[in-house]
Image (spheres, rainbow, N blue to C red):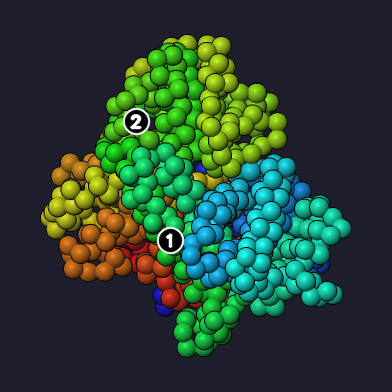
Amino acid sequence: MLIRSSATRMLQRAATGRLYAAPRTVCRSTVLNTAMATRILPSSSMLVGSDIASSMFSTRTEPSSPVLQQQQGMFCRQCEQTSNNFACTSVGVCGKSAETSSTQDALLYVVQSVSRWVVAAQNADRNGSAKALLDEINVWTLQSLFSTMTNVNFSSDRINEYTKKGIEYESKLEDLVVTQLGGTPPAPVTVNPETGNNILQDFLKSSNDFEAFGHLVSVPARQQQTHHEDGFALTELAMYGIKGACAYAAHCHALLEAMSPEDKAANLPAFESITADVQAVLAKLGTLEGGTANDGPSDDPKVNAAFALVMQVGEINGRVLALLDQAHATKFGAPEPTQVRMTAVQGKCILISGHDMEDLHALLQQTQGLGINVYTHGEMLPAHGYPKLKKEFPHLVGNFGTAWQNQKFEFASFPGPVIVTTNCIVEPRRTYRQRLYTMNQVGYDGVQHIGEDRDFKPVIEQALGMDGFPRTIEPASFHTVGFNHRAVLPIADQVLGAAQSGALSRIVLIGGCDGSQWERSYFTDVAENLPDDTLILTLGCAKNRFIQSEKLEGATLANGLPRVIDMGQCNDAYSAVVVASELAKALECSINELPLSICLSHLEQKAAAVLLTLLSLGVKNIRLGPSLPAYITPNVLNMLVEHYNVMPTGDVDEDIKSMMKGE
C-alpha cells in the first residue's frame, strides 16, 4: 500500500490536468509539460509495483525514431526541466546550444579518462612524488564537472579549454605511471572496436573537433555501450550527483585557498580525502562491476554495483557539505540570525549572485569606502548572516531580487553592474549584457569575465559611472537569515517543548532548487496552507517561493518561535541534517520517526547530490517535484519507492493531510 499511495498522487494530478498559478517567467518546457498533463492515464487502483513506476513516466513524449539509438545531435536530460520530460534534442530549455552540449559530453569523457589515470598514479606512487600534479588535477576535475552543470557555462570555447587541459594531464599521467613509476595503465573508458585503442586517442589522430567527439560519447552512445538500461540509469544518477558534489567541493577549495595557513592545514585532509574518493567514483562510472545478487536492492549484480556507486556519491557529498559548512564558519564566523533589508537604498550599487562567499568578500574589500552599496541576489542572500561580512562591511546593505529564473527581469531593473559568481546564469538580455560579469566556471559568450585574481576594477568603475538607486524605499521590508544548525540547536529545547505542549504539530522542510514551471507554486501553496502550528525549515533558492509571503511574514508559533526558519543555501541541507539528527537523539528515535516531512524542489545536479546524501543516510518519505528526473527508469524508480518511499509532489491539500498524518 505504501508503494501505491506514494505514486498515485502524480497520476491523479496528471489525469485531472490541474494547473497552478504561474510565476513571473514561463519556459518552453512548462507549456509542453502542461499540455501533456491532460493525457488520460491508467486508473491508479489498477497499478501495483513496477506498473506504478512505469505509469509515472507515461507523460513522456518519445520520438517515433528512438533518440537513444542515434549518435548524432543533441541529447541532454540532466535537469528537471528537460524538454517533454524526456530530453533536449535540438536546443536546451536552458538555452544551451547543441554545440555546447556536445563539447560538454566530450569534457565528461576526458574527466572520466583522466580519473582512471589518477587512480593508477595513486596506486603506483609509493613515495608521494606525484602529489603536486595530482592535487592540481583534482582541482581541475572539480572545476571541469562544475562547468558542465545546468546554467553554468554556455561557452563552447571555455568548455574546450578544460578539455584541452585534461588531455594534457592525461599525457603527463601516462608518462608518470608507465615510464616513471612502472605502473599499470588503466583500461580506457571506451575502446574503439576497430583498433582496440582508447576512442579518444584514435579520434585525436585525425581531428581536434571536440563537438564531433562529443557525439561519439553522448548519453545515447554510452547507454548503447552499456547494454543495461537500469544500470545505466543509475550510473547517470551517480554522474549528476557527483557533478553536484564537485560543485560544492569547488566552493570548498575557493574558501580553503583564502584561509590562513593554519586554518587551511586543519581543513585540507578532509578535502584531500574527498577528492580521492571523487576520482575513485569517476573511474568506476560505467563499469557496472563489483556487485552481487545478494548485496543490494536488486537480484541483478550490475544494478547493485551501480546502486552502491550512487550511495557512495551521496556519502561523499555529505562529507563535502560538512566541510563547506565548517569552511564558511572558519572564514566568516558562525552564522547568526540577522534581518536583511529586501528593499533599495539610495546610491550607487553592485549586485552579486551565485554561491561563492569568498568572491563577495573580495568585492566588499575592494569597494570599501568608495560610496558603492553592495546587494546580494539569489543564493548569496545567506551571506548577511555571517558576522565577519555584516560587521566589517556596512556597505553590504541588503538583498535585491529573488531566485535565478527571474534574473532577466531583476537584472534589467537593477541600476548597476551585476556579477554572477556561480550557477545560475541564463541568456542575458541586451538591456544588461554590457554590465554583466561572470566568474569562476560561469561562462557566456559576449559577457565580460573576471579572472582568478578577483580584480573587480572594471565592475567598480562601471558602478561609479552609473546613477544607482535614486531614492531609498520606505517602509523597508526585511527577511531573517542565519538559522544555521549552530543557531538552531541552542533553541532545540524550545522546539521540543512546543511539540510536547501541543504548540507545534509538525516540522516541514521545504527546500531545493527553484525553477519556472507553473507546478512549482506547489511549494508556495504547501507553505501557505500548512496549519498555523507547523514549523517550516527552508533552504536553497526554493525558499523564494514563500519567504516574502504576506501570509507567513512575521508568523510565529504559540511560544514565539518564528514559523519560517531560513537555514541558508542549498548546501546548508547539512544544517537540516544536523538539526534532525540531534532532535532524533533527544527524542530517542530515528530521523524517519521524527514529526518531520520533507518536500524537495528538484532542478539540477546540486539538488541531485543533496537527494543522494539524504538517501545515503537512510532518510525516507521525501516528496520530490514538480516532476521526477527523466533519466530514471521505471525499475529504478520502483526501487527508490520500495526502499525509501520517494514520492512525487501531488495535490496540495491531499499532501498536507498526508504529511500531518506522518505519511
SS under mark 1: helix
- Decide which of tag 1 and tag 2 comes sooner along the chain: 1
Please state the horizontal and vertical placement of residue 546, each as a whole percent of the image: 40, 41
Which residue is more in the foreground, 446 or 128?
A: 128
Q: Residue 73: give its label.
A: none
* Residue 626 point in image, percent of width and height: 52, 55
User: Does the image show residue 372?
Assistant: yes
* Residue drawn at (52%, 53%) of the image: 132
Compared to 639, does 319 lie above or below?
Answer: above
Disc 1 crowd, CA 10 A, few/some/many (<14, 14-19, 20+): few
Q: Nearer the viewer, mark 1 or mark 2?
A: 1
Image location (x, y in percent) of residue 339: 30, 31
Cα–Cα gap, marks 1 and 2: 29 Å
| Residue matched to label 2 | 389
State the image quarter where residue 57 is shown.
bottom right
Q: Which residue is mark 1?
A: 273
- The answer to whether residue 462 is above or below residue 27 is above
Kindly identify the amino acid type of the residue bearing the numbered disc 1.
Ser
Q: Dot 2: what SS?
A: helix
Q: Please, is residue 366 above or below residue 245 in the view?
A: above
Residue at 66 percent across and 67 percent down: it is 179
- Pick the residue in front: 480 or 273: 273
- Is the residue marked by circle 2 packed among few (<14), some (14-19), or many (20+) residues within 10 Å? many
Residue 561 pos. (x, y %): 20, 43
Q: Quadrant of the N terminus?
A: bottom left
